[in-house]
Image (cartoon, rainbow, N blue to C red):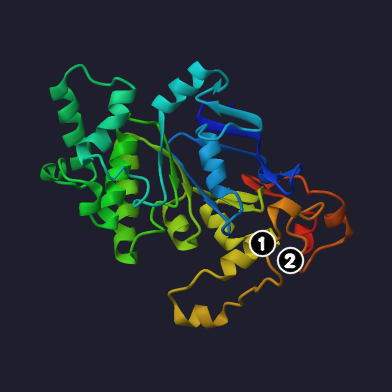
């Protein structure tokens, strides 16, 4: 683990046992052998269609789900014991997708933001607690008179700001952003994304930014990872993955990104995938994408391709990427 790496995940697996009959169950492989590292101060974007395991990666990374297998390293230390997890949670936080359901309707804004301060005992007097709460509110663009109001009195964008202030209360180094703008109006999305950028500059934050809107991810991310059916299929710098995608699934995703230039948009050839995404309960053998891939071969059915570095910083898991134009 290099000095500039803050978070590293090695062979992470998260399986959920699903009851399939009266006495039978089957593992749903939500995350299956995923490895990546996030450098200090960078934003790693994590994309893929609904149900591919993005959110499960984020939650497992913060030990909201106990990992089935694999290792999570933070700041050069492996997270193993309860003490490690508690210390890790003091230095990391999560912004949830839905600002409507992730805030307690019975708590005032001040109590919602102050809860992490209470849990980790991060103040020495009631006045210090109040000052910290007001400072956090100002940081995310909320007025001090909002402190004694309840979450239902706010718009979606303001609620998400409350959620962000709560995440920042522990002064974290690492923040998992789980589709933090997907429930918001487009006009509000830009404000919240810009705020994430500013907070990163001010506080030196490191982000795992989970989303399915590729334009949003491109704007905020330094590097982008692509997931499909619990597996990571490609990882590279944001510009590299947009200009030179190697995996056929990534190529299809990138062809769907709307282009602002009408001339380029007309020339853009949309790659439409056939078939539906398979169920993670009955995933195909070998490469999970092979049932929808126009370039699939016998090797794809026989074994899962290794997730390997094919050029500097560009990782891909595909048997045939060299032969795809």
* Up/down of 281 relative to 7, above or below: below
**Visible residue check, residue 2:** no
Q: Residue furthest front?
A: 22
Badge 2 is on which residue? 292
Quadrant (top left, top right, bottom left, bottom right) of the C terminus: bottom right
Quarter of the rendering occupied by the N terminus: top right
Q: Residue at x 52, y 69 (%)?
A: 257
Q: Position of residue 196 (x, y in %)?
A: 34, 47
Q: Nearer the viewer, residue 43 or 159?
A: 159
**Placement of 254 over or under 104, stated as above or below:** below
Q: Which mark is residue 88?
A: none
Q: Is residue 201 visible?
A: yes
Marks 1/2: CA–CA distance: 9 Å
Q: Secondary structure at mark 2?
A: loop
Mark 1 vs mark 2: give the one in front: 2
Q: Secondary structure at mark 1?
A: helix
Relative placement, left or right, of 143 versus 217 is left
Q: Are marks 1 and 2 in contact (CB under 8 Å)?
A: yes
Q: Which residue is painted at 46% across and 34% down in the image?
A: 40
Q: Residues within 10 Å of mark 2 (few under 14, many from 20)?
A: some
Question: Which x, y percent locates residue 107?
Answer: 25, 39
Residue found 20% across the figure and 30% down from its top:
132
Q: Which residue is mark 1?
A: 249
Labels 1 and 2: the sequence-earlier one: 1
Residue at point 38%, 36% (across, down): 205
How packed mark 1 is, by other alpha carbons closer than 10 Å (few <14, some 14-19, many 20 or more), is: many
Q: Position of residue 119 (x, y in %)?
A: 33, 24
């Amino acid at each position: 683990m290099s000095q500039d790496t803050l978070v590293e995940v090695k062979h992470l697996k998260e399986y959920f046992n699903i009851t399939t009959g009266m006495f039978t169950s089957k593992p749903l492989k939500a995350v299956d052998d995923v490895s990546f590292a996030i450098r200090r101060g960078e934003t790693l974007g994590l994309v893929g269609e609904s149900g591919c395991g993005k959110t499960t990666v984020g939650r497992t990374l913060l030990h909201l789900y106990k990992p089935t297998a694999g290792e999570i390293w933070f700041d050069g230390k492996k997270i193993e014991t309860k003490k490690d997890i508690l210390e890790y949670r003091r230095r990391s936080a999560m912004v949830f997708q839905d600002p409507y359901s992730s805030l307690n309707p019975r708590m005032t804004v001040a109590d919602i933001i102050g809860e992490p301060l209470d849990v980790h005992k991060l103040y020495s007097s009631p006045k210090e607690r109040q000052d910290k709460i007001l400072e956090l509110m100002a940081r995310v663009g909320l007025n001090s008179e909002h402190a004694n109001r309840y979450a239902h009195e706010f718009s979606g964008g303001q609620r998400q700001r409350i959620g962000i202030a709560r995440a920042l209360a522990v002064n974290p180094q690492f923040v998992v952003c789980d589709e933090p703008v997907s429930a918001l109006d487009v006009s509000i999305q830009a404000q919240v994304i810009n705020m994430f950028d500013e907070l990163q500059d001010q506080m030196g934050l490191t982000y795992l930014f989970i989303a399915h809107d590729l334009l949003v991810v491109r704007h905020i991310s330094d590097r982008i990872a692509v997931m499909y059916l619990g597996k990571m299929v490609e990882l590279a710098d944001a510009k590299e993955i947009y200009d030179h995608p190697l995996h056929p699934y990534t190529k299809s995703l990138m062809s769907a990104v709307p282009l602002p230039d009408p001339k380029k948009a007309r020339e853009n050839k949309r790659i439409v995938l056939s078939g539906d995404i398979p169920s993670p309960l009955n995933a195909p053998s070998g490469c999970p994408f092979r049932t929808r891939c126009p370039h699939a071969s016998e090797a794809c059915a026989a074994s899962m391709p290794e997730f390997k570095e094919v050029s500097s910083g560009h990782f891909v898991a595909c048997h045939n990427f060299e032969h795809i134009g």
